[in-house]
Amino acid sequence: MVVIKKRYHLDVTDILIWTGIFIITVWALGKATGLINSPVWVDMIPVFGVVVTIAGISLKIGAILQKLNQVIIDVGDIRMEIKNVDKRVISIETKAD
């Protein structure tokens, strides 16, 4: 069995997700400790955090689905190659008999 270790790299979607989570957490802590008084724009901070998080998650899911689609295409190609190899082996076997 071959184990391939893939190094993880941070991309834009990860940054969006973690930024949204960070915004919501800082806002909640600031609100709980009384550091944040409530003008209207400050009350909207969690909404901005949720929007950023949802955008990041959506982009991440899109990237995963693209990779999955490529895997499906590659599996189809491999199946065709296996059929071709099977035909060649059968023709060699019939010639050998």
Image (spheres, helix red, strand yellow):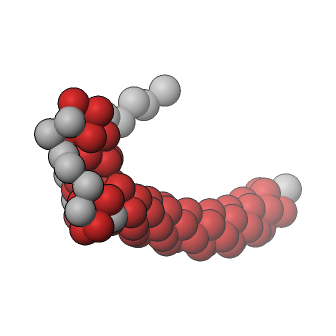
Quick check: 73 left or right of 48? right
The location of residue 19, given as percent across then percent down, is 23, 53
Q: In the depicted view, which residue is nearer to us: 71 or 23?
A: 23
Which image quadrant is residue 69 in? Answer: bottom right
- Note whether residue 13 is visible: no
Q: Which of 52 and 66 is in front in this view?
A: 52
**Can you tell which quarter of the image residue 33 is in?**
top left
Residue at the farthest top position: 1
Q: Residue at x 66, y 70 (%)?
A: 76
Q: Residue at x 39, y 63 (%)?
A: 47
Number of labels in the image equals: 0
Q: Quadrant of residue 60?
A: bottom left
x and y, in percent, of residue 2 in the image:
42, 31
Left-right relation of 4 to 10: right
Between 93 and 71, the residue placed more toward the observer is 71
* Residue 44 versus residue 18 in the image, above or below: below
Nearest to the observer: residue 1 or residue 89:
1
Residue drawn 69% across and 65% down?
79
- Would residue 43 be visible to someone looking at this image? yes
Identified at 85% across, 56% down, the residue is: 97
In the picture provided, is 81 more to the left or to the right than 38?
A: right
Vertical placement of 2 versus 9: above or below?
Answer: above
Q: Where is residue 73 in the image (x, y as percent from the top left)?
A: 59, 73
Position of residue 9 relative to residue 67, above or below, is above
